[in-house]
Image (cartoon, rainbow, N blue to C red):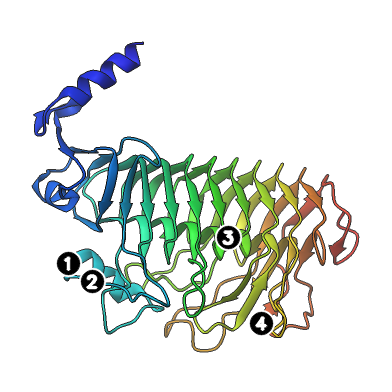
Amino acid sequence: MVVLAGALVLAALPAGTAAARGGSTHTVNPGESIQAAVDRAASGDTIRLGAGTFTEAVCIDHKALKIVGAGMGRTTITWPDWGQAAPLPEVATNPCWEAHERSDAEGNPRTLADDVSGLFFLYPDGPVTVSSLSTRNHPANGIVAWGANGFDVHATSGTGHERYGISAAASTNIRIAANVEKGVDRGAPWYAGTGGIGIGDSNGANARITANWVQGYNLGIFIRESRGGRITGNTVTGNCVGVLMFDDAATEVPDATGNVQGGDFRITANAAVANNRYCLAGRDGSQVVSGVGMSVTNADHVTIRANTVTGNRANVPAGAAPVNYPGGGLSLVTFAPPPGTLPEGVPGPGPVEHVEVTANHFADNAPVDIFVTPGEPANPFLGPAGPGIVIRHNLCSTSNPGGLC
């Protein structure tokens, strides 16, 4: 009752009225501009969105704001439909779209139309929060922050974003909880988005990814070249890979000059079920991936415990190229980057090492429940696992090499 009363008092405050901790609240209703409210706001302010639909893409440049909707599915920030039958609408330049263009090696360098996100926090000067709203259809990301110290996204949903549903890069103190992300396959050349939830290029991420549902993306939860965090109680299903922790040694945000050694994560009590989409992965499409529940690639000091990993099997369309990335329930992989993909002078990533896999339930995965790259792999892009691989007390049936179950 006390919480409800407080919420009613806050909702009754007119736009610009002082709220808790000295910030102001700006109320925006459908037909009004979120971007205009953001431009008026100061760091520490709250943007409160009314129920309804906003056809917008919002750049929050160097501001720390709290953006709150009327509820998941009640407040929606959307972009016009696009795909094979409808080209992306052109957009005016701003610092967010320009920054994305500079770092996105997969985008069209001749336009900013594919660099548009629903809510983009570019180097905020304090913690940011987004909650109780939905995003839809943006050709870059749904909700994204670069350079944030404090990024809290909870109780949101996202549909059909082309890069990430929710993403943090070069950030610390990340909380992504109780969100629903669903990919939309638009066919060639877009297919579905890169990842439902992504963290990249973040050293000391202190990330907590908890109780999210991700379905229909290339990668459900994607941790790339980031260090420090927990992935707990999530469900990933219908993706090409359910959970991927990947160290590629090639920082992309804000540029290619850094190098974060990926690892130091705990992956516990998640469900990775039937991640059987077919994907052409990698910047050149050379990796063909399907049917991977979880994978740790080149990262170190990772704990995988008490997860349920079932029904992950490659699904290759007739006439399509065969899978060349190890599939099944869990794969621990040392992967050599293809020639020419690392920046000059940047060493390649180290092997997958110091990974503990305990008390997980594997079932109905193919070709195996657990795969560890062997000392002499047949695939030229694979190398041997490093030291400290511990696999014990799991419920599973098949492994490569044998004897791990």
Residue 345 x, y percent position in the rendering: 43, 83
User: Taking 202 as reference, is 391 left or right?
Assistant: right
Q: Are marks 1 and 4 in contact (CB under 8 Å)?
A: no
Of the numbered discs 2 and 4, the one sitting upstream in the chain is 2
Amino acid type for the residue under numbered disc 1? Asn
Q: SS class of the residue under badge 2?
A: helix
- Seen in the picture, residue 75 relative to 55 is either above or below; the reply is above
SS under mark 3: strand
Q: CA distance from mark 3 to mark 2?
A: 28 Å
Q: Position of residue 350 (x, y in %)?
A: 59, 70
Q: Position of residue 150 (x, y in %)?
A: 33, 44
Residue that numbered label 3 is attached to = 245
Residue occupying the far top of the picture: 1
Q: Is residue 82 above or below residue 49?
A: below
User: How busy is the neighbourhood of tag 1: few (under 14 within 10 Å), some, or many (20 plus)?
Assistant: few
Report how far apart the C-alphas of labels 2 and 4 lie in the structure.
34 Å
Q: Amino acid at mark 3?
A: Met
Q: Earlier in the sequence, mark 1 or mark 3?
A: 1
The reply to whether dot 1 and dot 2 touch (C-beta < 8 Å) is: yes
Which residue carries the number 2 mark?
A: 98
Q: Identify the amino acid type marked 4.
A: Phe
Disc 4 element: loop
Identify which residue, 349 or 288, lies in the foreground. Answer: 288
Residue with the mark numbered 4:
381
Specify the label residue 94 is tagged with: 1
Instruction: Name the N-terminal-most of marks 3 and 4.
Output: 3
Left or right of 130, for residue 346: right
User: Of the residues under marks 3 and 2, which one precedes in the sequence?
Assistant: 2
CA–CA distance in space, label 3 to label 4: 17 Å
Residue at image position (65%, 72%) is: 289
Q: From the viewer's perspective, is the residue at label 1 or at label 4 nearer?
A: 1
